[in-house]
Image (tube, rainbow, N blue to C red):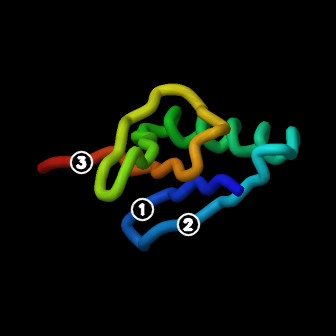
């Protein structure tokens, strides 16, 4: 199972999907496109405490984190 973790001001929401289920992978890809289109940054964990920003959906990523756009003031 792969997990997409969406961070926001209230905490996080986790969405899991089976990488072998085509319908679930398509739903996860749509979620990826919607979130990144709304300004979220997507990153995959590469090791303990390490991440790498990604620009396209990777169904093989075990865990993808989505961070909201930072707003300064």
Q: Which mark is residue 71?
A: 3
Displayed quadrant of residue 46: top left
Q: Circle 3 sits in a helix, a strand or a loop, which is it?
A: loop
Q: Are marks 1 and 2 in contact (CB under 8 Å)?
A: yes
- Judge by depth and name the residue closer to the eye, 21 or 9: 21
Looking at the rendered image, the disc whose residue lies closer to the viewer, 2 or 3, is 2
| Residue under label 2 | 13
Mark nearer the N terminus (1 vs 3): 1
Residue 1 point in image, percent of width and height: 71, 57
Q: Residue at x 86, y 45 (%)?
A: 21
Looking at the rendered image, the disc whose residue lies closer to the viewer, 1 or 3, is 1
- Judge by depth and name the residue closer to the eye, 49 or 4: 49
Mark nearer the N terminus (2 vs 3): 2
| Residue under label 1 | 8
Whole-Å distance between the Cαs marked 2 and 3? Answer: 21 Å
Residue 43 point in image, percent of width and height: 42, 42
**Residue extending furthest toward the left:** 73
Instruction: Count residues near mark 1 (Cα–Cα under 10 Å), then give few for <14, some for 14-19, many for 20+.
Output: few
Displayed quadrant of residue 33: top right
Instruction: Count residues near mark 3 (Cα–Cα under 10 Å), then give few for <14, some for 14-19, many for 20+.
Output: few
Q: Are marks 2 and 3 in contact (CB under 8 Å)?
A: no
């Amino acid at each position: 199972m792969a997990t997409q973790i969406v961070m926001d001001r209230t905490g996080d929401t986790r969405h899991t999907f089976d990488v072998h289920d085509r319908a679930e992978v398509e739903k996860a890809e749509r979620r990826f496109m919607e979130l990144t289109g709304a300004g979220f940054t997507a990153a995959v964990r590469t090791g303990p405490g390490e991440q790498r920003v990604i620009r396209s959906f990777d169904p093989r990523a075990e865990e993808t984190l989505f961070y909201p756009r930072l707003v300064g003031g």
